[in-house]
Image: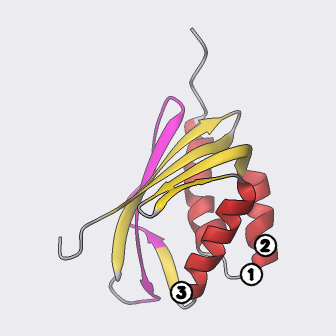
Amino acid sequence: MARTDESADRIHDLLQRNLQEVFGEGDAMRRRAAIDELWTENPTLYVPPGVIVGRDAIDKFAGDLRATHPHFVYTPTGEPQALHNAGRLAWGSGPRGEAPDYTGWDVIIVEDGKIAALYVFLDQRGK
């Protein structure tokens, strides 16, 4: 059986850094540097609009998303959790200091200390 355990500390770090340095980052060069550091060579992002494959496509998606609400911040709403090679983190997004406009969960699959897949679950509004 293949080893599937990743360091819980590393998974927590990846979850938190990805939220801030990829999806929360407005500077394109810093965002791309974070993607190159935190994600595997050929990662997959699963979001409600569809499946996005590869660092370039993830970079474009994150940049386009950021451009729709550049003044929003992403704030963890709980502690990250890790299990074997996976982790999850609940978060909210909205203007700094205000209640979030939307909330969700990031669930990552980690390979060799990097994000191989990210599943983004958005909570239903009003719940």
Residue name at image x 56 percent, y 59 percent: 16
Residue name at image x 67 percent, y 82 percent: 26
Label 3 element class: helix
Mark 3 and mark 2 lie on one chain; the one further toward the N terminus is 2
Does the CB distance between marks 3 and 2 fall below 8 Å?
Answer: no
Residue name at image x 65 percent, y 67 percent: 22
Label 1 element class: loop
Q: Does the magenta stretch include residue 67?
A: no
Does the CB distance between marks 1 and 2 fall below 8 Å?
Answer: yes
**Residue designated by label 2:** 30
Q: Residues within 10 Å of mark 2 (few under 14, many from 20)?
A: few
**Residue designated by label 1:** 27
Please give the label number shown on residue 68. Answer: 3
Q: Does the magenta stretch include residue 96?
A: yes
Mark 3 and mark 1 lie on one chain; the one further toward the N terminus is 1
**What amino acid is labelled 1 in the image?**
Asp
Question: What residue range appears in magenta?
Answer: 75-97
Distance from disc 3 to disc 2, alpha carbons, whole Å, reads 18 Å
Residue 18 spot, x, y in % from top left: 61, 60
Nearest the eye: 127 or 79: 127
Colour approach in the figure: secondary structure
**What amino acid is labelled 3 in the image?**
Thr
Quadrant of the drawing holding the N terminus: top right
On screen, 91 above or below 36?
below
Magenta-highlighted stretch: main secondary structure? Answer: strand
Distance from disc 1 to disc 2, alpha carbons, whole Å, reads 6 Å
Instruction: Count numbered badges in the picture.
Output: 3
Distance from disc 3 to disc 1, alpha carbons, whole Å, reads 14 Å
